[in-house]
Amino acid sequence: MSRNLPVNAGRIAEDIEALADITEPGRPWTRRAFTPLFLEGRAHIEARMKAAGLETRIDAAGNLIGRRTGRKPWSGTIMLGSHSDTVPDGGRFDGIAGVVAALEVARSLHDHGLELDHDLEIVDFLAEEVSIFGVSCIGSRGMTGQLPEAWLSRVSGDLDLAGGIAQVGGEPDVLMQQKRSDIAGFLELHIEQGPVLEAEREDIGIVTAISGITRIEITVEGRADHAGTTPMDRRADALVAASQLVLDIRNAAAELARTPGHFAATVGEFRIEPNAANVVPSKVVLRIDGRAEIRADMEAFCRWLDGHVEKLATAYGVTIGIPNRVSDNLPTPGDAGLLSTLETACERVGAKYRRMASGAGHDTAWIAKVAPAAMIFVPCRAGRSHCPDEWADNDDIALGAAVLFQAVREMDKDSKREKADGTHTG
Ligand SMILES: [Zn+2]
């Protein structure tokens, strides 16, 4: 890349490679939260934070934070971050690219001798991925007062989550009283984990919204019968009805996906009983994972589903329970002001960008509940992620870091503008 960026691409590559080396031997790339390797990765990040002149600490929720004090700390904190934990057999970039890019922004400000009015914090959020405790986004929920207290007693082996948080240096005893109120703005860089940017040759995705996630469980009950002797027209085959349902869900989701706003629905869990070759299936339990950028789409999907299962039950002579919404999260729109700040930043560094939704969940969704927050995507090869093939070109990450760098400078100006517009109340 011949662009003259305000960040150093070589340092980004070095850090990503150094973290990639910290993995379970013979199982690249695995550095799960609450393991000794995770702490080793964090020790590296903390050392790099210190070298960049940041003051480091672990907050009550177990987040690693590097801080640089601003000239007018009362303006609030500009926060950048992502996560350094991986899924088992994951990639080198998911989360890590965002932590390293954020760190590079701090280093570059330092190199350019640029002081900010705001305090700046670089955050490695604890356990963004589903951890050994079976839940995700522990650090970002904890920092913002959204960690359900009951989760602290979730157990894995002989450790509970409270103990896990304490082991990484957090303070589970005071965690429930935490809720940051000083965040003036939050930005996260992340690999897209999808194929759009690469296919459309865009440099940056400005994330309009993080899709809401709705999980729905459906039970189909038929009747077990002898597979050899029961005539085809006298069966109540739960699997046949459930199979039809899966296809219809796919078609309904595809239709919603063609309208504006990201939408996807997947039947990813499917249990069949009695699951024997010579018995007509008596019961199927399936689970839908639905993602919607626009809440009305999810409502429309659920209404369709409720009506459709009744029709299918009649048509196939089976019983289908009312679809049960096991969990239901609303979409999180990116902060409108930050989205336009990010567009300005892209233009400043000469990055081609498009607006797009995130189908995946991210720490940003939790921070957005308490502060203006937004995120950017950088391209990744063939959209592959959560697997060892995950790859993002270093130049693309560096360009993303440059966008963050410019956006931070814009955000810092914004506070001055607000102050200038404000009346002089002494
Ligand atoms: Zn991630």
Image: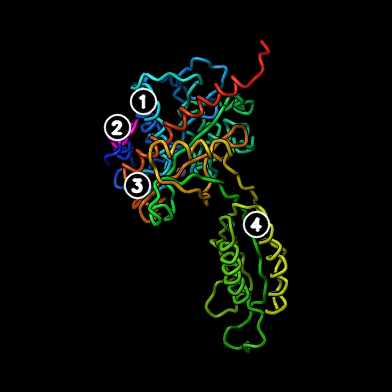
Vertical relation: 135 (above or below) 184: below
Q: Amino acid at mark 4?
A: Met
Residue highlighted by disc 1: 107
Q: What's the mark number on residue 392?
A: 3
Tell me, yes or no, whether the highlighted magenta stretch contains residue 5: yes
The earlier-in-sequence mark between 4 and 1 is 1
Q: Position of residue 127 (x, y in %)?
A: 49, 38
Front residue of 286/211: it is: 211
Contact between marks 3 and 1 (CB within 8 A): the answer is no
Q: Secondary structure at mark 4?
A: helix
Mark pair 3, 1: CA separation: 21 Å
Front residue of 263/239: it is: 263
The earlier-in-sequence mark between 3 and 1 is 1
**Residue at position x 41%, y 36% from top?**
348
Mark pair 4, 1: CA separation: 42 Å
Q: Is mark 1 within 8 Å of ligand 1?
A: no
Q: Amino acid at mark 2?
A: Arg
Q: Sort mark 3 into few (<14), some (14-19) or many (20+) by Cα contacts within 10 Å.
A: many
Q: Secondary structure at mark 3?
A: loop
Mark pair 2, 1: CA separation: 10 Å
Residue highlighted by disc 4: 298
Q: Which residues are magenta?
A: 4-14
